[in-house]
Structure formats: structure tokens, C-alpha cells
Amino acid sequence: MKNLTTLLLLFASIISFSQGLTGNELLEKAIQFHDPNNNWSTFKGNLFVTMETPKNSDRKSNIKINLPKELFSVVAIRDSIITEFILDKGACSFSLNADKNPSEETKKKYNLNCERVKMLKDYYTYLYGLPMKLKDKGTIIDQKVAKKTFQGKEYLVLKVTYSKEVGKDTWYFYFDPKSYAMEVYQFFKDESRNDGEYILLSGLETINDIKMPKSRGWYYNKNSKYLGTDILSTEDQ
């Protein structure tokens, strides 16, 4: 009976602790799961990503990220088109099928410009740097952790907004209540209109001792319409 009482008290303390987590505490636990050795801040490596969408052929991307050297590049192949974008210490360059000086018409058709290079760098480093990127300057962590059930599973949910200089979207990150693994996230531009998208994460790929989601499925919030899936690999497919 004494042992049973001890176990019940321990269980109650665990439940109480999980309910009492602040936003920052939940974030730290999630980072401890995904990046236990704090390797993201000095990340350098290659990500091979295959993007599957319902009405297009697959796009295969070789993404190189070297944070210490401020170097980012992505070579993407879809059908017979090969695009390359490079951002090296703020200096951008791009090419189409190895042509580094495409015509103005070609640049417009294929969206070849420095704004796109910077957007791709921000996009890939943000999504594959999560949840560690939530410690970046301008990120506002809601200290109230919610419990929500999403597609039949209960999660600890972190609400994140950003300073006006960084962004206007509202994000929600869903973590497994036992392992603190990130399994879902969603964003809204205007939450009252239920716009934006949610992303289902499955599987893990370990790169530089960082556990990254292997598969990311994208869906509209308003009607759950499927948009596509990104599949991460440690080697070119």
C-alpha cells in the first residue's frame, strides 16, 4: 500500500509538472530532444529534399547550409530544369541549366532574383532549424502552454508570434507530451478566417546529431486539402 501511494504521488507530480510548464520550459525540452548537443548553431551539411505535389512531377533539391561561413545554396531539379541559388555572406547568385547570365525574360519566367535566393535561405533554415529557430531574436513565445487534441492525439502546444520587423503570422507548435518531439505545426495569417496551413511531421532523420522531421505533409487549415509532402534524406536520391 505504501508503494502504491508513493507511485500515485509521483504520477501526480509528473502531471502537475507538465501542466505547469511555461512556454520557455517547453521549448527547452523540445530542443533537448531534437538538438541535445546544441549543434544547430554551428550547422554545416547537406539536406536532400524531394518535394511531391499532386499535379506536378517531383522536385529534388540539394540544399547546402553552412551557418559559420554564412553560406547557403540549393540546386533544384524538376523535369529538365535545373536551378541553382547561392547566398554567400549576403552576396547572391543564380543560374538556370548552368547559365549564370540568363536573359531578363528567363529570369522573370523562372523567378530568378536575389529576393528569391534570400527567401529560400530563410525558408529552409527556418523549417529545418525548428524548434531551435524559435530562440531567434524577434520571436515571441507565449508562456501559457495549451493542451490540445489534434487528429485524435493530445499535444502540448506552444503559441508563437513575431515582432513586426520579423513577421506577422501566428504559429502553433505541437509537441508529444512524453518525448517533447515536435509532430505538428500550423500557421495563420488571420486566425479568425482559419486561413494558413498545418504541417504533419513523421519519421526522423538524424543529421549532425540533430533529429529533423523526415516527412512533412502540408494541408490547408480551412478544408484540410492536401498540398504536398517534403521528404528529407541524408543522401541524394
Image (cartoon, rainbow, N blue to C red):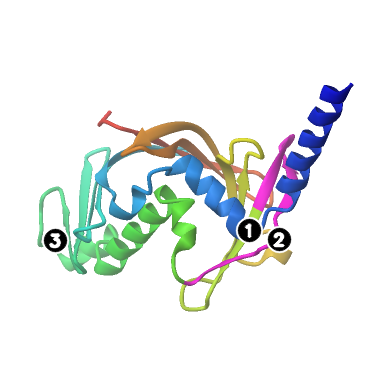
Q: Which residues are magenta?
A: 138-157
> Circle 2 is placed at which residue position?
144
Spatial CA distance of label 1 from label 2 is 6 Å
The earlier-in-sequence mark between 3 and 2 is: 3
Q: Which mark is residue 23?
A: 1
Question: Of the numbered discs in the image, which one, if any, rests on residue 213?
Answer: none
Q: Amino acid at mark 3?
A: Pro
Mark number, residue 102:
3
Q: Tell whether position 155 is magenta.
A: yes
Per the model, the C-alpha gap separating discs 3 and 1 is 48 Å
Residue 237 point in image, percent of width and height? 28, 28
Tell me if I can see residue 147 in this picture.
Answer: yes
**Residue 106 lies in what quarter of the image?**
bottom left
Q: Quadrant of residue 57?
A: top left
On screen, 140 above or below 96? below
Q: Is residue 46 toward the left or the right of residue 127 in the image? A: left
Question: In the picture shown, does residue 123 fall above or below 192?
Answer: above
The x and y percentages for residue 98 are 11, 50
Q: Residues within 10 Å of mark 2 (few under 14, many from 20)?
A: some
The picture places residue 120, in percent across and down from the top left corner, at: 33, 57
